[in-house]
Image (cartoon, helix red, strand yellow):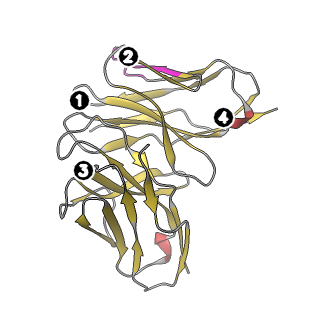
Amino acid sequence: DVKVTQSSRYLVKRTGEKVFLECVQDMDHENMFWYRQDPGLGLRLIYFSYDVKMKEKGDIPEGYSVSREKKERFSLILESASTNQTSMYLCASSSGGFGQGGSPLHFGNGTRLTVT
Amino acid sequence: GDSVTQMEGPVTLSEEAFLTINCTYTATGYPSLFWYVQYPGEGLQLLLKATKADDKGSNKGFEATYRKETTSFHLEKGSVQVSDSAVYFCALTRVTGNQFYFGTGTSLTVIP
């Protein structure tokens, strides 16, 4: 079974802090994704990556950056956390590489981030 | 662009009732279609999938058939259980792309 592990289930940070959310997958998947999930808005894609050191903006990249230095690890960075970034963050991975879709996403359990 | 529309919730059913959650999609070409389930406090889990027209995905008593003529992928289960209470998401991805498109989710509560 594919395992996607997010480093924290719950996180509380202060406004203005730099926040790192870590995600690791163990199935050698090429593609990795960061979503945020908010009530009434469903899942919104922040960034995704189809290879090491490659990244693509999703629908809501503002205020976020990402890093993928190793194939199995994809980090989401909140440069200066704000209260409107309080949300559930979901990491996911899939096989296939750039332009090769069709494979299902495998999700981690999520990180619930609260910014105060 | 590509999109998924699923029925609004919340849905409340009695145990052993029949379940249908409607999902329709807009996409160019031939997308792959998925249903995901999210239990409270957890991430999304793949429930079933279908990759071409007329394919039927099935898992844990749930079924959905890829209908290209109606651009639909409705989720059904003949007899729901309390343990099926969760949020259900319909999603698509194109074979030639990397992005997934999700519906907004349908919350299901099954009461004994």
Name the residue carrying label 1.
Answer: B28
Classify mark 3: residues with Cα within 10 Å, few (<14), some (14-19) or many (20+).
some
Residue at mark 4: chain:
B
Same chain for the residues under marks 1 and 4 in the image: yes
Residue A62 higher or lower than B79, as above or below: below
- At mark 1, the secondary structure is loop
- At mark 2, the secondary structure is loop
Give B25 or B38, whichever is nearer the viewer. B38
Name the residue carrying label 4.
Answer: B84
Image quarter of residue B68: top left
Three-letter code, disc 3: Glu
Q: Earlier in the sequence, mark 2 or mark 4?
A: 2
Assess whether mark 3 and mark 4 are in contact (beta carbons under 8 angstroms): no
In this picture, residue B1 sits left or right of residue A79: left
Residue A83: x, y in percent?
Answer: 50, 76
Same chain for the residues under marks 2 and 3 in the image: no
Classify mark 1: residues with Cα within 10 Å, few (<14), some (14-19) or many (20+).
few
Name the residue carrying label 3.
Answer: A30
